[in-house]
Image: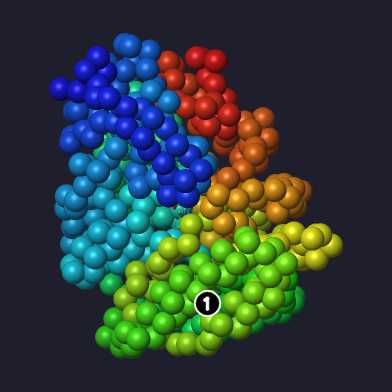
Amino acid sequence: MIEVAELPAPTRWRNWAGNQRADVPVVHPGSAEEVAELLVSAAAAGRRVRPIGSGHSFSAVGRPEDVQLVCDRLAGIRAVTEAGLVTVSAGTTLHRLNLELQRRGWSLTNLGDVDRQTVAGALATGTHGTGARFGGLATQVRGLEIVLPSGEVVECDAVRRPELFAAARVGLGALGVVTAVTLQAEPAFALRAVEGPGTLTAAVEGFDELMTSTDHVEFYWFPHTDATLLKCNTRVPVDGLAPLPRWRAVWDDELLANAAFAGVVAAGRRVPALVPPLARLSARALGARTWTDHSHRVFVSRRRVRFLEMEYAVPRETAPHVLAELRRVHEASDWRAAFPVEVRTAAADDIPLSTASGRDTAYIAAHVPAGSDPGCWFGALERLAGEVGGRPHWGKLHGLDAAVLRERYPRFDEVVALRDRLDPAGVLGNAYLDRVLGPGARG
Ligand SMILES: Cc1cc2nc3c(=O)[nH]c(=O)nc-3n(C[C@H](O)[C@H](O)[C@H](O)COP(=O)(O)OP(=O)(O)OC[C@H]3O[C@@H](n4cnc5c(N)ncnc54)[C@H](O)[C@@H]3O)c2cc1C
């Protein structure tokens, strides 16, 4: 039995990037029933509870105010059907899920570029990968088990409680605590990765052709240069694997992409004038390569250099304009941007608070080293994306509030009304949710 009256002493928490912190009691429920007991007793005591996954969000979306509910004991695969429906406890990491699925001959359709997030945490903020024909992770969800703020444990899908299901696939952790997720996997596939240099000029001029040239395309633009690193991944059968030799994987992914890049970032922080020449060096360092491996091994990379990130989802057809403008304002400034700008796409989906809701989407992401001030760089991206109705990633830094977000999501009020009905006392709230969804009845 988990009672708010018997909570442990506060524990210090910080997110992956180190920009969100809290000192609150932490609980680790092992079942939906224990989650329910906690929510009921927190509501009675007027306390707020925030579920947390791996803490990989940059925004304060998961920052607890009174009690933190860590989902690490809600982990593991519950069932996989012959049709590839996999039911997984909500706190399972994508890393573990991918390995278990590979062992059983299944793959997830699309993934972001790291896999340390929990399934529920990744879904809550609309985590996505790239691919003009493919949606984000939430589009693969077929059912959810949720503990509502009232303590009721419910299952929802397209037929049972469809309104809750529609919204809770990207629910910001505001509608209930998800305890299990059913995802549609597909028969295991591999990706043939073709990576190499390109230019921003070519990407802007032929954006649509480039981003639809194969299944999963993304590129990184190195500010201070015209250089890009292009990654084009094509879905192929698993019987023709040609993984990178171990030395090459270590050289490229550990030494160049992580260790050397960490040095570049550190040098740029000490001597900002070095950033432009180092950016040119970084752009040249990552050479061309082609390899084929299990899908999750190609989708996912290691990110050891800590950073802060802002990412905006813009209507796909507006991306060339936004990128050209971002480059123009960057060139007209004296800003030093050591990290590349990442550009991806996703197909339109029907999830109310998905950043790709109702429109084919391009994602544009800017980064700065953890611990530094993003200043005008993030501000420029936010302004330019805002001019075309851009929607911020819920788990990444942005400055928008409910008044602006309501204009950018046609079904925004539907979700807010549902949240107000399910959580009138704001048990699952925090300051971030008060800002982006409005404070609700409690405010
Ligand atoms: C290095 C790095 C790379 C990244 N790459 C990508 C990428 O490629 N694509 C992309 O879209 N994003 C990316 N992100 C962002 C990341 O995927 C999201 O922020 C994601 O939400 C993090 O998952 P998490 O398990 O850490 O969740 P947390 O950050 O711990 O929590 C996120 C939200 O989920 C809620 N939550 C957690 N558990 C539950 C639950 N059981 N029930 C209800 N709500 C819950 C929390 O309350 C919070 O609101 C990246 C982040 C980092 C640090």
Q: Residue at x 18, y 67 (%)?
A: 104
Q: How many marks?
A: 1
- Residue that protrudes farthest toward the front in the picture: 270
How does the figure colour the protein chain or chains? rainbow
SS category of the residue bearing label 1:
strand
Of residues 393 and 305, which is closer to you in this image? 305
Against 8, residue 381 (above or below) is below
Q: Residue at x 65, y 37 (%)?
A: 400
Residue 172 is left or right of residue 334, and the answer is: left
**Where in the figure is residue 351, as x and y percent of width and height?**
49, 45
Is residue 80 visible in the rendered image? The answer is yes
- Examine the image and state in which quarter residue 346 appears: bottom right
Q: Residue at x 53, y 69 (%)?
A: 263
Which quadrant of the rendered structure holds the N terminus?
top left
Q: Identify the amino acid type marked 1.
A: Lys
Which quadrant of the rendered structure holds the C terminus?
top right
Q: Residue at x 25, y 31 (%)?
A: 27
- Examine the image and state in which quarter residue 423 appears: top left
**Where in the figure is residue 152, as x and y percent of width and height?**
26, 24
Of residues 164 and 11, which is closer to you in this image? 11
**Where in the figure is residue 84, as x and y percent of width and height?**
24, 61
Against 219, residue 129 (above or below) is above
Q: Which residue is mark 1?
A: 231
> Under 8 Å from ligand 1: the CB of mark 1?
no
**Where in the figure is residue 106, as x and y percent of width and height?**
25, 67
Is residue 416 visible in the rendered image? The answer is no
Against 58, residue 41 (above or below) is above
Residue 225 is left or right of residue 248, and the answer is: right
- Classify mark 1: residues with Cα within 10 Å, few (<14), some (14-19) or many (20+): many
